[in-house]
Image: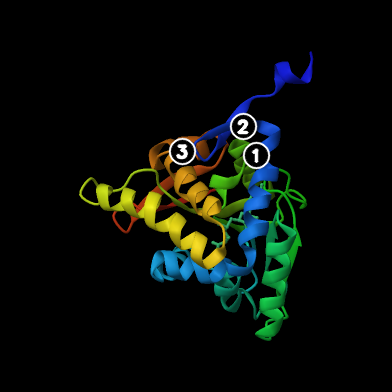
Amino acid sequence: MREEETSAEVDFGFRRVPETAKAPLVRAVFDSVAGRYDLMNDLMSGGIHRWWKAELIATLRPRPGQRLVDVAGGTGDIARRALPYLTGKPDGGVVVCDANPRMVELGRARAIDDGILAGIEFLCGDAEQLPFADCSFDLYTIAFGLRNVTRRERALAEARRVLKPGGRFLCLEFAPAVTPLLQPLYDLYSFRVLPALGAVVAGDRAAYAYLAESIRRFPTPSALSEMIADCGLDRVKFRPMTGGIVALHSAWRL
Ligand SMILES: C[S@@+](CC[C@H](N)C(=O)[O-])C[C@H]1O[C@@H](n2cnc3c(N)ncnc32)[C@H](O)[C@@H]1O
C-alpha cells in the first residue's frame, strides 16, 4: 500500500495534519518557547501550576529507593519535586525523559546550577517508544505532556510496559471543558489573553494559541480514563482540580 493511503490525520491544535507532521510541529513549538517556558508557566497560570504539581507529588507519595520516570518532563519540575523523597536508599532516583533536546538541556543546566546532581538523569526520548527495558520503574508520571503526543495509546502502552507490576501511573493534564460558570471567562483567557502573553513574553503567539487549541481537542477526563484502561492499566481514577481546568489521572499496573 502507498504511504498516503496509510497515513492518518491527527489534531495539531485546531488543524488536522498528517500523523507524521505532528511531532516536528510540536518540537518546533518547544524549541521556540524553551528559554521562556518556566517563566510563562508562572505567568499564565498565576503560579497555580506549582500547586497542581505539588498535588501530583502528594498523590504519588514517592518513597526512598523507588525509581520514577517523568515522561515529557521538560525542564524537570516534577522530577525535582519528587527527588528528595526517592533518595536515601540504593537505586532510588528519577529519570526525566523528553523528546525535545533543548528542553532537556535547559532542565539539566537548571539542576546543575541549583547543585542537584545525584539521583537525577535527563535524557532525550519519545513517550511512544521509551528507551527503557520492561518493568524498569516503580512510578511513571507525565504532566502536560500527553496532549502533545501523536499516538497517545502507544505512549500509554509504553507507560504500562516500563512500570513494574504494582507500579503507579499519574497523568496531570488540562481538560477540554471547565465548570460552565467559568467557561466564558476561560474562553476569553485562552483565546485572547494567552496568545497575547505568549507574543509579549515568549515572542511566539502561535505557540500559545496552539496550547489553548490543543487543550480543547484533548479527550475529556472520562474519555482519557477509558483510553488508559484500554491500554492495560488498572484502577483508573481521576480528580478534577481548579474548576476542572486540569485533571489528575491515576492508575496502576497490576
Ligand atoms: C508542556 S511541556 C511539560 C513539561 C513538564 N512536564 C512540566 O509539567 O512543566 C510538554 C513537554 O512534552 C514534550 N514532548 C512532546 N511530545 C513528546 C513525546 N512524544 N515524547 C516525549 N516528550 C514529548 C515537549 O518536548 C515538552 O517538553
Say which of 182 and 226 sits in front: 182
Question: Label 2, label 3: how many angstroms apart (C-alpha)?
Answer: 13 Å
In terms of secondary structure, where does tag 1 sit? helix
- Looking at the image, tell me whether mark 1 or mark 2 is earlier in sequence order: 2
**How many residues crowd around disc 3 within 10 Å: few (fewer than 14), some, or many (20 or more)?**
some
- Looking at the image, tell me whether mark 2 or mark 3 is earlier in sequence order: 2
Residue that lies at the very extreme toward the top in this rendered image:
1
The picture places residue 9, in percent across and down from the top left corner, at 61, 27
Q: Can you tell which quarter of the image residue 62 is in?
A: bottom right
Say which of 42 and 83 sits in front: 42
**How many residues crowd around disc 1 within 10 Å: few (fewer than 14), some, or many (20 or more)?**
many
In the picture of the structure, the residue carrying the numbered disc 2 is 17
Q: Residue, x 72% and y 79% (percent of image)?
A: 118
In the picture of the structure, the residue carrying the numbered disc 3 is 217
The picture places residue 58, in percent across and down from the top left corner, at 44, 68
Asked whether disc 1 touches disc 2, contact meaning CB atoms under 8 Å apart, the reply is: yes
**How many residues crowd around disc 2 within 10 Å: few (fewer than 14), some, or many (20 or more)?**
some
Q: Nearer the viewer, mark 2 or mark 3?
A: 2
Q: Amino acid at mark 1?
A: Lys
Question: Label 1, label 3: how many angstroms apart (C-alpha)?
Answer: 14 Å
Question: Label 1, label 2: how many angstroms apart (C-alpha)?
Answer: 7 Å
Indicate the quadrant containing the N terminus: top left, top right, bottom left or bottom right. top right
Q: Which mark is residue 22?
A: 1
Residue 16 vertical position relative to residue 125 in the rendered view, above or below: above
The picture places residue 42, in percent across and down from the top left corner, at 46, 70
Q: Residue, x 57% and y 62% (percent of image)?
A: 203
In terms of secondary structure, where does tag 3 sit? helix
Residue that lies at the very extreme toward the left in this rendered image:
181
Q: Amino acid at mark 2?
A: Val
